[in-house]
Amino acid sequence: MKQWFWPGWVCTVTLTAVALWFGIKPLEAELSLRAQNDLQAYDWTSFSLEGRDLTLRGVAPDEESQIAAIKVANAIEGIRVVDDLTSLLPLAAPYTFQIEKNGDGIILSGYIPTAPLRDELMLEMEKRAGGVSVMDEMALARGQAPNYISLVKFAILQSAYLKSGKIALIDMRLNIDGDANDRLDYYRLQNALNNSLPEGASVGQRFIAQP
């Protein structure tokens, strides 16, 4: 009767391959969990894993965020190599934003730094739209002033006092041209422009008609 056997080296290689096959998947799962936790502050990123090698992707809102995300990825325990495929948003100068109200609805246009902020601004505008449609014509870009987002949110709040018109931001300067809903909203809007501007902001052109 013939007896079949594998040579010792064949057995060793085969068992090693099996161990690697079944071991790499739990390892990737663990590394994936670590990467998700460590990179969660950088919601513009995505990644993929090949064994212990991580490929980082995404469009960063600014250079600081890009550098920080790459540093975090390289510091993830167990990662051997990080392949950086991230890029930067295009630079916009001047950095502009506009709210336009007319008989067809409301249009938000101009630049914002992140997609989550786009969703947040759309939600805030829809809350104050009085049931009219809100159209999104915003684009992602970098180059905003430090307090720019506060000025955008301020503009959205004040737009509720306008029946029609435009509020346009050029960097940190706010221009407004429109018709107030009524006399009370006219004075509310004037008071906000005079006393409640975010730090670093200024008012340029101001044409507000009262009923």
Image: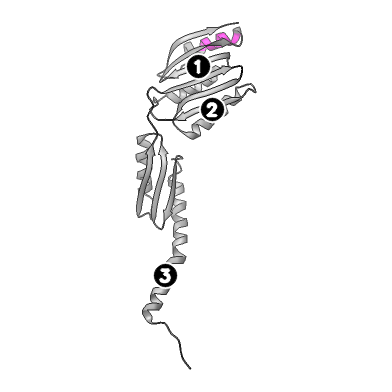
- For marks 2 and 1, give the CA distance: 15 Å
Mark closer to the chain start, 2 or 3: 3
Check contact, mark 2 vs mark 1: CB within 8 A. Answer: no
**Which residue in the structure is indicated by mark 1?**
167
Against 54, is 152 above or below?
above
Left or right, 135 with respect to 142, comes to right
Amino acid type, callout 3: Ala
Alpha carbon distance from label 3 to label 1: 65 Å
Give the prevailing secondary structure in the magenta stretch.
helix
Which mark is nearer the camera, 2 or 3?
A: 2
SS label for mark 2: strand
Q: Nearer the viewer, mark 2 or mark 1?
A: 2
Question: Residue 83 appears at what percent x and percent y?
Answer: 36, 49
What residue does disc 3 label?
17
Q: Is residue 171 above or below residue 73?
A: above
Q: Check disc 3: other Cα within 10 Å, few if <14, some if 14-19, many if 20+.
A: few
Tag 2 and tag 3, C-beta contact below 8 Å: no
Q: Residue 194, relative to residue 82: is it above or below?
A: above
Q: Nearer the viewer, residue 195 or 39?
A: 39
